[in-house]
Image: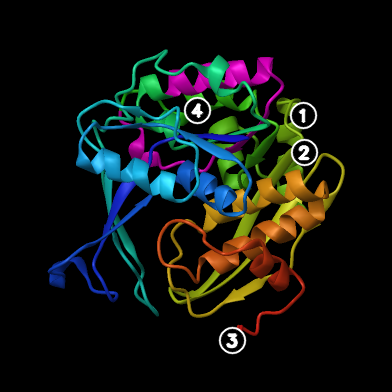
Amino acid sequence: MVITFGEMMMRLSPPDFQRFEQANTLEIIFGGCESNVAVALANWEMPASHVTRFPSNPLGKAAKQFLDKNGVHTSFIQLQGERLGLYFLENGVAMRAGRIVYDRYHSAFAEIEVGAFDWEQIFESAKWFHWSGITPALSENCAKECLRALEVAKQKNVFVSADIYYRSNLWKYGKKPQEVMPELVQYCDLVLANEQNLEEIFGIKMEKTANPFVSSASKMIEKYPKIKKVVDTERISISASHNQIKAKMFNGKDFLETEYQEINPIVDRIGGGDAFMAGLIYGLLSYQDDQKALDFGICASALKHTIEGDTNLATVAEIENLMRGDASGRLKR
């Protein structure tokens, strides 16, 4: 069982690439950094459970039903609090960038109490725990509850991954990422981060070497000995509709990277990083091979860009087909 912990929101988007100013209707989709990982894994028949809190109202129940429908275990989700976090997305196209407006302050999840979840029970049959830098940014209690989860995960020898990319504008409760994240990351086995993150949050100075990523990742592993792998993705944005992406990893000994995947046109790029993370988790648990897991992750991310919504509905067969180099998109009969 893979456990994910974090806020899932309702996404509201104008249809057909309309701008906010011209839209008369908004389409509803549910998504969140960690829940997107859980949905993808469940879609690939890997047991996944998402831990969060929704308000006990029709919107909260609809969010839970979305996870239920997608095969995610929801037995640890609490229905309490006042409101569901929202975000509004205007999809970009060609040379026009997309725009996001958040409306998530004082959400049911952000106002959880410390001690709200029984992590001993949650991790009873868990193999993996995934969290992101967004969760501790939402409130001091979210940060403290994340720490509680990590402490229990370590006691139970659960493998821990973290996407430590963070949204600087979310840290509104008086603490900075530099004050919170180091204590949390010390429990991680794998982190997703780039050189800039590692310098800004953990003080690991980026060096001008032949491979700055390896240099920074090596220092991160030295500073936090529990970390076994540091991964990241690279994106070349030719336009909002045309990107190239690849992934890389330093596992303490070897530097691994994938080929670039060409994505043109992009249908929806939201959740592309979560799709990569889910693919990497699936690959590491299924293949026991770092390079193959990295390839699976980047191909999963590339295919997510062709699917509307936050979550990746590409199948394992489709991803493995792309791994073999078939990007033809030929009709399947």
Q: Nearer the viewer, mark 4 or mark 3?
A: 3
| Residue range of the region highlighted in magenta in the rendering | 143-172
- Identify the residue shown where x is 22% and y is 71%: 19
Query: In the picture, residue 172 is in which quadrant?
Result: top left
Dot 4 or dot 1, earlier in sequence: 4
- Identify the residue shown where x is 29% and y is 49%: 10
Residue 186: give x, y in percent of width and height. 64, 23
Task: Name the residue carrying label 1.
Answer: 222
Q: Is residue 210 visible?
A: no
The residue under label 2 is which amino acid type?
Ser
Cα separation between marks 3 and 1? 49 Å
The residue under label 3 is which amino acid type?
Leu
Query: In the picture, residue 142 is in which quadrant?
Result: top left
Depth check: give the residue in front, 138 or 79: 79
Labels 1 and 2 touching (C-beta < 8 A): yes
Element on which disc 1 rests: helix
Quarter of the image that includes the C terminus: bottom right
Residue 265: give x, y in percent of width and height. 48, 80
Quarter of the image that includes the N terminus: top right
Task: Name the residue carrying label 2.
Answer: 218
Dot 3 or dot 2, earlier in sequence: 2
Cα separation between marks 4 and 3? 49 Å
Number of the label disc, if any, that sits on residue 178: 4
Dot 4 or dot 3, earlier in sequence: 4
Dot 2 or dot 4, earlier in sequence: 4
Q: Is residue 162 above or below residue 257?
A: above
Q: Nearer the viewer, mark 3 or mark 1?
A: 3
The residue under label 4 is which amino acid type?
Gln
Task: Tell me the crowding category of disc 4: few under 14, some 14 to 19, or many 20 or more residues within 10 angstroms, Cα based.
Answer: few
Element on which disc 2 rests: helix
